[in-house]
Amino acid sequence: MKTVFTLTWSLILLSGAACAKKPSQADVSADAKLATLGRIEVTAQLEEIRGDLINDPLYDYAHVMKYKVLQVHRGKVDQDTIYIGHYNPAEPRDSVADARVQQIGGNVRQFRVGDVHRLALEVPIDDHYMGGIINKYFGEVNDPIYWAVWTNRAAK
């Protein structure tokens, strides 16, 4: 009898735990930094990374990547496709800030094509970052280059 009672309570507790609401990816993507940094906030899917990301601690740079805008949360974005420069993209966003670029971060650990990010942005990049920029779209695309201030994972 004791075994049946214990088994019954175990099943009840397990089913309750399974039904508990887990935070969605959208909940994980939103944080105070996204809402306060930058003039623009979007959810966008990373469509392309041209060229290799440099993983050299002696070289600071921004690498421009192509994104498809899924939703604009604040500010104004005129195109469905935008180009965003990420500072030292081989570094995880939570440790990328340094003496040169202090107000930058997020929870993205690695940039992968197809991932969806929620981003706080500034535009144009030249007004917010004075350093090396790897832009493999130069001469091909005349759209403004956005500066990624904060980058979090997001749901599709």
Image (cartoon, helix red, strand yellow):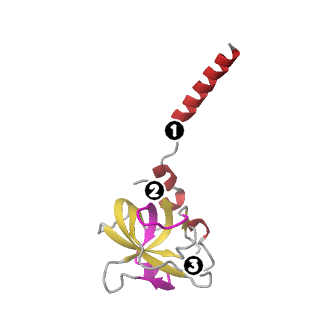
User: Which quadrant, please, contains the N terminus?
Assistant: top right
Q: Residue at x 50, y 69 (%)?
A: 149
Q: Residue at x 42, y 66 (%)?
A: 113
The residue wearing badge 2 is 154
The residue wearing badge 1 is 21
Tell me where residue 14 appears, x and y as whole percent.
58, 30
Residue 17: image quadrant is top right
Q: Give me the disc on residue 77.
A: none
- Amino acid at circle 1: Lys
Q: Earlier in the sequence, mark 2 or mark 3?
A: 3
Tell me where residue 73 appears, x and y as whole percent.
39, 58
Of all residues, the one furthest to the top in this rendering is 1
Callout 1 secondary element: loop
> Mark 2 against mark 3, which lies toward the viewer?
3
Callout 2 secondary element: loop
- Dots 1 and 3: beta carbons under 8 Å? no
- Report if residue 30 is visible in the image: no
Q: Looking at the image, is 141 positioned above or below residue 68? A: below
Marks 2 and 1, how far apart at CA: 18 Å
Horizontal relation, residue 67 to residue 133: left or right: left
Q: Residue at x 32, y 78 (%)?
A: 143
Tell me where residue 117 appears, x and y as whole percent.
45, 61
User: Which quadrant, please, contains the C terminus?
Assistant: bottom left
> Mark 1 against mark 3, which lies toward the viewer?
3
Q: Looking at the image, is 80 positioned above or below residue 100? A: above
**Highlighted range, magenta:** 109-135
Marks 1 and 3, how far apart at CA: 39 Å
Marks 2 and 3, how far apart at CA: 25 Å
The residue wearing badge 3 is 55
Residue 44: image quadrant is bottom left
Q: Earlier in the sequence, mark 2 or mark 1?
A: 1
- Amino acid at circle 3: Asn
